[in-house]
Image: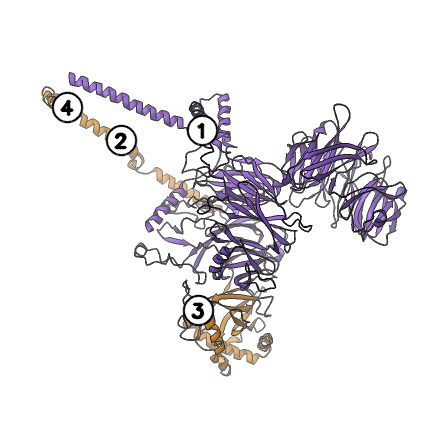
Chain colours: A purple, B orange
Amino acid sequence: MAMAIRVFLLLLIFLSSAIVSFSLYEDQVGLMDWHQRYIGKVKHAVFHTQKTGRKRVIVSTEENVVASLDLRLGEIFWRHVLGTKDAIDGVDIALGKYVITLSSEGTTLRAWNLPDGQMVWETSLHSAQHSKSLLSVPTNLKVDKDYPIIVFGGGYLHAVSAIDGEVLWKKDFTEEGFEIQRVLQPPGSSIIYVLGFLNSSEAVVYQIDSKSGEVVAQKSMVFPGGFSGEISSVSNDKVVVLDSTRSILVTIGFLDGDISFQKTQISDIVEDSGKAEILSPLLSNMLAVKVNKRTIFVRVGGEGKLEVVDSLSDEIAMSDSLPVADDQEAFASVHHEGSKIHLMVKLVNDLDTVLLRESIQMDQHRGRVHKVFINNYIRTDRTNGFRALIVMEDHSLLLLQQGAIVWSREEGLASVTDVTTVELPVAKDGVSVAKVEHTLLEWLKGHMLKLKGSLLLASPEEVVAIQELRLKSSGKNKLTRDHNGFRKLILALTRAGKLFALHTGDGRIVWSMLLNSPSKSEACERPNGINLYQWQVPHHHAMDKNPSVLVVGRCGSDSSAPGVLSFVDVYTGKELSSSDIGHSVVQVMPLPFTDSTEQRLHLIADTDGHVHLYPKTSEALSIFQREFQNVYWYTVGADDGIIRGHAMKSSCSGETADEYCFSTRELWTVVFPSESEKIISTLTRKPNEVVHTQAKVNTDQDLLYKYVSKNLLFVATVSPKGAGEIGSVTPEESSLVVYLIDTITGRILHRLSHQGCQGPVHAVFSENWVVYHYFNLRAHKYEVTVVEIYDQSRAENKNVWKLILGKHNLTAPITSYSRPEVLTKSQSYFFAQSVKTIAVTSTTKGITSKQLLIGTIGDQILALDKRFVDPRRTLNPSQAEKEEGIIPLTDSLPIIPQSYVTHSLKVEGLRGIVAAPTKLESTTHVFAYGVDLFYTRLAPSKTYDSLTDDFSYALLLITIVALVAAIYITWVLSEKKELSEKWR
Amino acid sequence: MTKFTLLLFFSCLYLSSFFFFSFSVAFQSDELLLDDEEFGLEGANPRSPEPVLTASPVSSSPTPTIRKRYSDPDLDSKIQFTLEHAFGDSDFSSAGTFSARLKTWSHGGQTLTKLRFSRNEFSDEEKDAFKNLLKEDDFYRIRLPSNVISPPGREYVIASVRARCLPRDGLDEHIVIHMDGANILAVSYGSPGACQYPRQLNLPRKWSFNSHTILKSSEQAPRTPIFTEEILGSSENVEGEAEVLVEKSFWAKYWMYLIPLGLIVMNAVTQATNMAEEQPAGSQGQAPAAIQRGSAAPRRR
């Protein structure tokens, strides 16, 4: 036992002392990594109608991306990911060559060059308050060779030059509490009409000179009922708004600066009354209103008279209207019917004239159509053709033209919320999976090519051939399990509630599935996905079953909303079952128990402090009852700064006798003083992490036992003042305190305060160590601190004799109720970069040394050896320590450009990194998600347990053959010689 | 309960004579503490039953009063807060009293010093309740106010332990109070040593508590060392070492060449000697060859 430990320790030391530098050669890029670029759910789309831009569409998305897409193929020409706080409010095209975006609540205006996406200018606009923002690019307004862009945001109206972004004039509306709703500009005049509401009960129209920004005239009129805020502009001098009771439509005409109201009761024009809602599409002289789930088209007459033109009961999505030939305007509407969608383009003036009617087969797992954008083009026969860009419920973007889907983009993958990895099915005998790719001759040819390549004899064409061979090498894209565990499925749950299965080989979507609500009730039509858990991983029993995952969803964004569970078969992507669980979901806790069919037991805590056991079977219940006494859980109240520990108490006592529901009681609390500490980060170890060695050998042959407990919680708090942005407080005002808390007893095992430091804290917790990243205000630098925690109570077990004679306590069960004797070691280093997220590599057995995967502010992933964050580093390590691999202490951590695992790529909007082990001990899967997706395989200590992909088997074979031949020849020769000797 | 402690608090503040009395008491128990310095911090001697504490205010000695006069009564004040306990899911009731001095520092911070703890004996009902807990392997829970100046503060700080972990000879308890100024962040409660699992049912021989208390405040992280000159120095050292390495002995540097060379030389020498032997024996060389031939011949057959 001890010997085995020693051997493994020696092996570990040997492995860790090997100098590791992870880097790729240029021709290895793309061999085992892939990168996918996305933009997110499209909010606005602007088609460009002039010559060069005709093939493009400009979109802005909910992931704060502005992008130019190829209309023919759906590829990204260019894109820019703005920061997470820089939400795009509006996008438009100015001067026919600039894309104008307004972002950050109307405070940042940028112009991008349309062909290549270069930023032309950027203007920060003054803002005094939060308000809705408005971007208006008048098409034919010209002021002294300049084309102003009218922007409202933060209480100010700005006119900005489209040419260089200079602010031409600025009008202050902050004092009045005036909120601008529409900016209208009658053609051929230099007067701008600005319509807004004052305290949402008074309509005010300003006439502003577009040259100077001076108010020419101002009219206001009080509307007694008050407005609801929903507005639709129907023409150049009329808007229609809803009053605050949502039962009256008010037409506001402001022709020549005179305001007139015209009220129309909705009940007068439609039979069924109810709360009305103005739909967003802008149609000329018409508006769409939704009453009682019916969509009603209301035409606005010349006198402001309203008349109902059409009324549809289907749920439809509509586009804005767009001018077609002969002063006509057309708009598109899409509705569902079975598995098909129907796209219709109608004239606004005459709803019976249908210009285009198409029906297209649509994948059920895309859900309903959310948005439609329409664009017209001239067909080859000189008639009007239409293409429609539609955004589906799963956030995917599709282009429809001529009754077919021209291209589609799975934009749901830009908002991944949770990721897990699962195994592929084992290759069956019947299926010829292990088919050798070609005949033996081709195999040999390929290897000869590789051999040439490695001996630098290959011609350029042959190099290309080698590269191709490598890329499609050895069936890395097969849908079966491989020996090394390199092929896996990455399951990604998106914000839209869609589950995607991606293949690690090339990143293609193997299957995708949109979550459904089982009840189909109105309140919960489409649940939001929250988390993903491994539900059933058959490996011992139930081998015939497919593995399945549990998707926990929620009806609505509120945490008290009822939850939905969905069980999905991993191999087929079919939903096995789903259920409305009838209680809220606050926390899901996978238990370390499985039943006879290898279903994992899960506890789900609700807002009332009850926990519910799943699966709801009697077997699960009996397993749980056995361990009832030993189940503990904790809750972190980030708002009130209290961490509470709970234990099971009894079955729920309520009107409904539910034997799978349990009440709990409070065992411990940790109360952070609200005036000095605020929880900003909590973290636990991954429950499925494997720790190979429990002990660490020092250079002086001393043993340190790791404190490896699954019940440790890392908590970081900052002083409430310091919770804001970096630099908003002085070093004296801010401090950062980190804790390691045992979650069974609530014991604080380690507590360290960093004076003059500030969050955000990004941390990673693995084995017995935590590494966290924060900002040091005194040094004006980011810092990384490592804390390692060791168990002193087992420190006496160093003696080999004790181990041999069994006089040790290594096998005694560890209980949290014993007083822990722990030793913590920590060390801090400066780190030059700001960090978005940190993860750590994980391998099957945990033998391979670890690397920290640091998602940097530049959206790249840096692999940093754990040896750099070792608290035993000293300034001048002794010879023995050097041999062990301890690096001399430096004040900052090195950033080696070769250790970026993303090499030249960027994972835009990086949000998370997931590492999962392969079957090969040396290798680990790394998957990073944000707006983009990136996958690669890493070998933190190099692939010591396998040959590389381009290992030349041919060379080996030839060598062996040559050797055998040589042996034979020399043997024959020697025989001959011997014979001749004998005959002499 | 709160009123009582508040009253005490105020009396401590304003009635200086009482104040000194209490300090004299404090001093006495401080002396006692010295032989129980197990944890190096202010802990109570639990075996001295608390009647001593309640009885002792009568006795007053002048010397400590004089000593205490130097301390500013505005900055240091005596406070008390109670420890409450619960058996399983029962309500909390008073179990003991902590008393300490609240020291106000010039920079505004406050710390507790000289913490003392007096534990109430279990009443008969409490003993029964505790026996029940032992039988059912249930939780014994304690709680403290989260703020010692204005108890209970925002919330109580709760800790609990399986009751079977406590009994040894008597009832051993170990309380670690994590403080931040005048706030109690958390309290760790349990037996001072290990708690074996599976937990055995043992009844305590004595129903008296043997308490150890520790106050803990947060450690300051060491500042990240900044060394530029040291690095330069060390790099020079490294260079120096490298030079030393260069001056390794000839053998140490070139052994890998020397050994094969030596082997070759030795080989050559032995061959040379063999040759020298063979040449004189060349004429007689037939005999061994014949023997060889003879020995080889049967093999061929």
Instruction: Give the mark nearer the N terminus: 3 vs 4.
Output: 3
* Spot occupied by residue A605 in the image (x, y as percentages of width and height): 57, 57
* Residue at the spot 68% in from the left edge and 51% down from the top edge: A523
What residue is pinned by disc 4? Answer: B296
Asked whether the viewer can see residue A723, the reply is yes
Q: Give residue B250's position: percent from left, percent from top.
A: 29, 35
Circle on res. A436: 1
- Kind of residue at badge 2: Pro
Decide which of A807, A593 is in the foreground and name it.
A593
Give the camera-side residue of B291 and A175: B291
* C-alpha span from label 1 to label 2: 47 Å
Question: The residue tagged with tag 1: helix, strand or loop?
Answer: loop
Q: Which of the marked residues, 2 or 3, is nearer the chain's N terminus?
A: 3
Q: Residue furthest top?
A: A984
- Label 1 is placed on what type of residue? Val
- Determine whether, in the image, residue B133 is placed left or right of residue A880: right
| Chain ID at mark 2 | B
Query: What x and y, as percent, mark residue A149?
Result: 78, 38
Cα–Cα span, label 2 and label 3: 72 Å
Q: Which mark is residue B163?
A: none
Residue carrying label 2:
B260
Front one among B45 and A429:
A429
Using the rendered view, name the quadrant where residue A609 is placed.
bottom right
Q: CB of mark 3 within 8 Å of CB of mark 4? A: no
